Image (cartoon, rainbow, N blue to C red):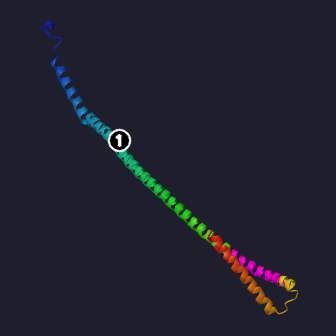
Amino acid sequence: MPLAEENVLVPAVGELIIGAISFGVLVFVLARYVWPRLEQIYRERRDAIEGGIARAEAAQAEAQRTLEQYRAQLAEARTEAAQIRENARAEAQRIVEELRSQAHEESARIVARGEEQLRNQRGQVVRELRVEIGTLAVELSEKIVSQRLSDDAQVRMTVDSFLAELEAAERAGAVSGDSS
């Protein structure tokens, strides 16, 4: 058969056998060594990505829990601050009331002491005036009678009656002054 009858597009049987064996060896090597390695690398990468996503989700959940704790602590701190302010206001009000009470007590005590001092001074002035009026009355009566009263009991009785008359006149003036 001449060479012209051979088809260039159809390979020779020997080449087909060598090509098939080479292809089989190539498939065997790829299936045995390369594909498992590629599969392992793919699994590791997938696990790393999924693990990263899981870690990110866990971190986000932790951040959310921390945020909620922060908000709870903030609300608690605000409540506590409001309670402290309220206690401070109540304490200030109590102190003000206590100081007012003390001031009123002190004022009443000072007024009472002043009234007592006035009564004491009035009594002292009345005693001094009695002595002075008694002396003046004796001197006046001596001048009028032109004699000296020598008896102390007599002088004292005269002074007491004179003072009684003055007090009666004073009371009568006070009573008439009150009814006006």
Using the image, determine if residue 31 lies above or below residue 65: above
- Of the pair 153 and 28, the residue shown nearer to us: 153
Could you say which quadrant of the image residue 123 lies in? bottom right
Residue drawn at x 15%, y 19% is 13
Residue drawn at x 17%, y 23% is 17
Q: Position of residue 94 (x, y in %)?
A: 53, 64
**Label 1: element kind:** helix
Q: Is residue 116 visible?
A: no
Could you say which quadrant of the image residue 53 lies in? top left
Based on the picture, tell me whether residue 122 belongs to the magenta stretch: yes
- Of the pair 15 and 140, the residue shown nearer to us: 140
For disc 1, the marked residue is 52
Tell me which segment is drawn in magenta: 117-138
- Of the pair 33 and 57, the residue shown nearer to us: 57
Q: Position of residue 47 (x, y in %)?
A: 31, 41
Left or right: 26, with 1 as reference point: right
- Of the pair 129 and 156, the residue shown nearer to us: 156
